Amino acid sequence: MTDATDHLTGDRIWTWRTPRHRLLLWAGWLGLVALFVFCWQVMTRGTIWAFVQDAPRQAADITDRMFPPALGYLPELMVPLWDTLNMATLGTMLGVVMAVPVAFLAARNTSPSPRLLRPLAMFVIVASRSINALIWALLLVAILGPGLLAGIIAIALRSIGFIGKLLYEAIEETDPRQIEAVTATGAGPAQILTYGIVPQVLPTFWGITVFRWDINIRESAILGLVGAGGLGLKLQASLNTLAWPQVTMIMIVILGTVVVSEWISARVRRALI
């Protein structure tokens, strides 16, 4: 906030920003608009606008073909649904096993080597979060072949960054007074970790784990598109044969699974936190 003088009355007028700040603000908005226009031109350079104009008619045609859903196809989805749930659950468990030590190495107050091990752990977290589960699955299917194993490992590798980041932040936010109290009893590093830090982060840990499991169910449902098994494999087969009623049934099953997992996740987090 600044002040200026009215030349007619001589009174001081308070303004929120100086003229220089207002000019910079308008220049910033102008630059943002110019950047948006430039990005829009780059993104739409190869767009065939005739297809865009015809998109509503095509969408209405596909929607008409998708209904009614193929209810008789539901029994064939039970085994792929079970595979999807197993992929999400086992992938989450494996991700937790790998993420917990990484989180303790990344936290400033628990890392044994802040100059060496902490940057390495942070790199693992960033690398895991930077690569999507579909990309992990593509690489692992090429290495291990198609199947659930590739999907489980892909889910686990993707989960390391999510769980590790939230967990190491929770470790750094622990109450130092409780740690000091445990230290004052003559406890060693392992006992300080067990009785001073772990009890404080345990509710957060379980909440993060359940939340990630909920996310992994959604991701594992589509990993079959790249050969990792589960519902995505059925979805890919139905799309390839243009079996739209089957696609609708698969989408309904995925939606129902996500809704149930979200309900379970919310109830568990409410009970833990």
Image (spheres, rainbow, N blue to C red):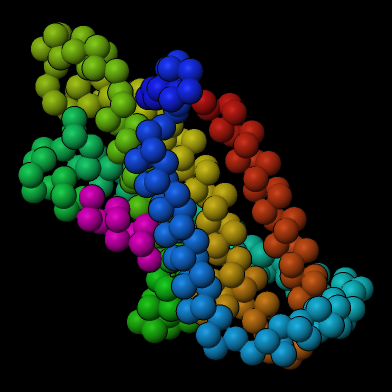
User: Which SS does the magenta portion mostly show?
Assistant: helix
Q: Position of residue 84 (x, y in %)?
A: 59, 64
| Image quadrant assignment for residue 255 | bottom right
Residue at point 58% right, 57% down? 217
Whole-percent x and y of residue 75? Answer: 79, 70
Picture quadrant where residue 167 is located:
top left
Question: On the picture, is 248 further left or further right than 86?
Answer: right
* Identity of the residue drawn at 34% across and 44% down: 165
Q: Please tell me whether residue 8 is drawn above or below residue 138 in the rendered image.
A: above
Q: Is residue 23 magenta?
A: no
So how many labels did they put on this image?
Answer: 0
Q: Is residue 227 above or below residue 108?
A: below
Q: Quadrant of the N terminus?
A: top left
The front one of 162 and 202 is: 162
Q: Is residue 38 above or below residue 24?
A: below
Q: Is residue 122 above or below residue 113?
A: below
Side (left or right) of 114 relative to 127: left
- Could you say which quadrant of the image residue 25 lies in? top left
> In the image, which residues are magenta?
122-131
Identified at 62% across, 37% down, the residue is 266
Q: Is 129 contained in the magenta span?
A: yes
Quick check: can you spot residue 83?
no
Q: Is residue 239 left or right of residue 126?
A: right
Q: Residue at x 52, y 42 (%)?
A: 210
